[in-house]
Image (cartoon, helix red, strand yellow):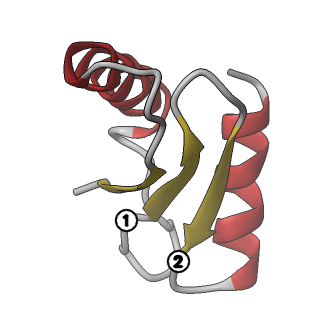
Amino acid sequence: MLRIRFELHPDPDASAEVEALLIDEIRRRLRKALDLVYCQRHGDFPTITARGRVGDRFDFHVTGCCHEFVRQVKWRIDEL
């Protein structure tokens, strides 16, 4: 199963509600694009770590079982 983690940098101007909505939207989009994606060779699912600040750009770090699979997942994320 796809694993999604968040590493948020505090933003004093953003409310907890806004942060929760943003996290839910990012999670929904990632799941839509990647929920059934797994490595055909090893059978593993990716782990995505979203890093950033609410109201700013997020970076996505992908870990997986092999370089080729990580590359495929990054390509799908770039298409979002």
- Residue in the foreground of this view, choosing between 60 and 37: 60
Q: Position of residue 41 (x, y in %)?
A: 52, 78
The quarter of the image holding the N terminus is bottom left
Q: Amino acid at mark 1?
A: Phe
The quarter of the image holding the C terminus is top right
Q: Amino acid at mark 2?
A: Gly
Question: Label 2: few (<14), some or many (≥20) within 10 Å?
Answer: some
> Taking 12 as reference, is 67 above or below it?
below
**From the viewer's perspective, is 78 left or right of 20?**
right
Question: Label 1: few (<14), some or many (≥20) within 10 Å?
Answer: many
C-alpha separation, residue under disc 1 versus residue under disc 2: 7 Å
Residue in view at x 47 percent, y 22 percent: 13
Q: Position of residue 16 (x, y in %)?
A: 22, 25
- Residue in the foreground of this view, choosing between 74 and 53: 53
Q: Tell me the element at label 2.
A: loop
- Do labels 1 and 2 touch, CB within 8 Å? yes
Residue in view at x 37 percent, y 74 percent: 44
Q: Position of residue 70 (x, y in %)?
A: 67, 68
Q: Position of residue 9 (x, y in %)?
A: 50, 52
- Residue in the foreground of this view, choosing between 45 and 16: 16
- Residue in the foreground of this view, choosing between 63 and 59: 59
Q: Residue most toward the front?
A: 12
Residue in view at x 37 percent, y 65 percent: 45
Q: Earlier in the sequence, mark 1 or mark 2?
A: 1
Name the residue carrying label 1. 45
Residue 11, numbered circle: none
Count the marks. 2
**From the viewer's perspective, is 56 left or right of 19?**
right
> Taking 40 as reference, is 60 above or below it?
above
**From the viewer's perspective, is 77 left or right of 50?**
right
Name the residue carrying label 2. 64
